[in-house]
Image (cartoon, grey):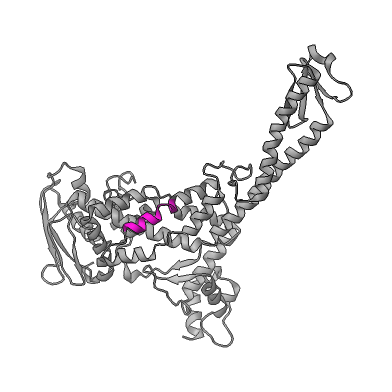
Amino acid sequence: NNKDYYDSILNVNKDAYAVAPKNVQTWNSDGDDSFSSDYKIIKDNFEVADRNGKNIDISKNLFAICSINGLMNYIEKTQKQVPKNLNKIIYYEPTKYMTLDINARKNLEITERLKDKSKKGTLLWVLDKTSTSMGGRLLRRWINDPLLNPQDINYRLNGVKELKENMVLRSEISESLKNVYDIERISGKIAYGSANARDLISLKSSISQLPQLKNNLKNVQSDILKNLYNSLDTLDDLYELIDKSIEDDPPVTVKEGGIIKKGYNPIIDKLIDLTTNGKKWLIDIEQKEREETGIKNLKIGYNKVFGYYIEVTKSFLKMVPQDRYIRKQTLTTGERFITEELKNKENEIVGAQEKIVNIEYDEFVKIRNIIESNAKRLQITSSIVSTIDVLTSFAIVADDMNYCMPEVDNTDIIDIKGGRHPVVEKILKAGEFIENDAYLDTNEHRLNIITGPNMAGKSTYMRQVALITLMAQIGSFVPASSAHIGTVDKIF
């Protein structure tokens, strides 16, 4: 808590110091060790919390302040903006998660196979029954960061248990989630200003499923599902905004019109009526000119060079009224003319079409900005939906593969009865995998010696124990008859 302490940190961490803004690099003359100016920027613009959502004070954490400022400087320089969806910082505390080095991750084939880097044949492949892209990403994060706190683990397990036992609830949730697009990615595109009208329609379609999803959870009993139910924002106002403003089947680009619904903006409606009536007027004038001139094949056309024109074939040129028709272009088959009346109407129609495109784009940007201002709500909703998706995925796998709920506490015991390797079991035919028991503790059973010939299953057995332990600590049921998993650090 003094200047010498922080100076010593800066000496051993010059890289972090170098990327920090100048005001971080300057010690406050009044001796305040909170880096007040930089911390105030972080505090005013970000919510800093742990992975359980609990707010954290980083005012005295130099490394965190330097890292956050350096990262945001990088984003601002490369993206030319700081998107509004970047509003929350998750503080990673290694003591809350089981550390897995790169060799353990590779050999256990948690998220990719050692042989070809594919997903099939991994633990992720076994557990991934998620319905959304958001849920798939969260599942990968959970697998890579197994929990150590038994209370947090059992918080998840109880939710999985309820979903496993209630097949109707599980099916209803899965059905709702199938129609949910990637809210997380869409909100990111909105924040960067790259979302088009179709993205907003996808967002509306996703939001439309939230009331039913919330209704499905109204009678749940487990704490985690209750909290998810209470926290789930159905975003009704955003749904209503998109529903009344954006066409249901808009074009891909946002600068060609056709994206704003009739009735949302009276100015756009008036201009659309003008162009619609103008086109009807062109049909009427074509018929009138045919009748007045007697030229049966007279037609009115349009191109970007000459605008609207009257085309007459060579055989009828003698019937063209010289007092009203102004020659504009000669063709091999005939000639094109314009009239004063036609030119005036063209200016009205073309001017209205250009105005429609410009006003619709401006209106779309306003709508997108309103949604962007709700970026935090979208993030929270996507996080809740992702969590529900992963818990449901765990429940589906547990029911399909006959997994049991592990008993997780902070003892020093790993006691597995009838354990099975989750990946090998799924690849083999039902009933082919031979179940195994395992017992370890920190006293007389710290080490087991496994013997047998090559290809006898020694490595499979060792990986099986590791994977069952890991599965329990991410909140999943496990492939065993019963399992008691202690999570004290000295086991690992």
Instruction: From the viewer's side, name the closer residue of 142 and 491.
Output: 142
Image: magenta residue range: 206-216
Horizontally, residue 147 falls left or right of residue 137, namely left
Residue in view at x 57 percent, y 65 percent: 73
Kindly tell me whether residue 448 is visible in this rendering: no
**Dividing the image into 4 quarters, which one contains the C terminus?**
bottom left
Q: Position of residue 438 (x, y in %)?
A: 12, 60
Instruction: From the viewer's side, name the closer residue of 238 and 87.
Output: 238
Residue in view at x 46 percent, y 67 percent: 89
Horizontally, residue 205 falls left or right of residue 294, namely left
User: Is residue 446 depicted above or below 213 in this figure?
Assistant: below
Residue in view at x 78 percent, y 30 percent: 306
Q: Is residue 211 magenta?
A: yes
Q: Position of residue 397 (x, y in %)?
A: 24, 51
Residue in view at x 53 percent, y 85 percent: 32
Horizontally, residue 86 falls left or right of residue 138, namely right
Residue 163: name its quadrant. Answer: bottom left
Q: Is residue 140 magenta?
A: no
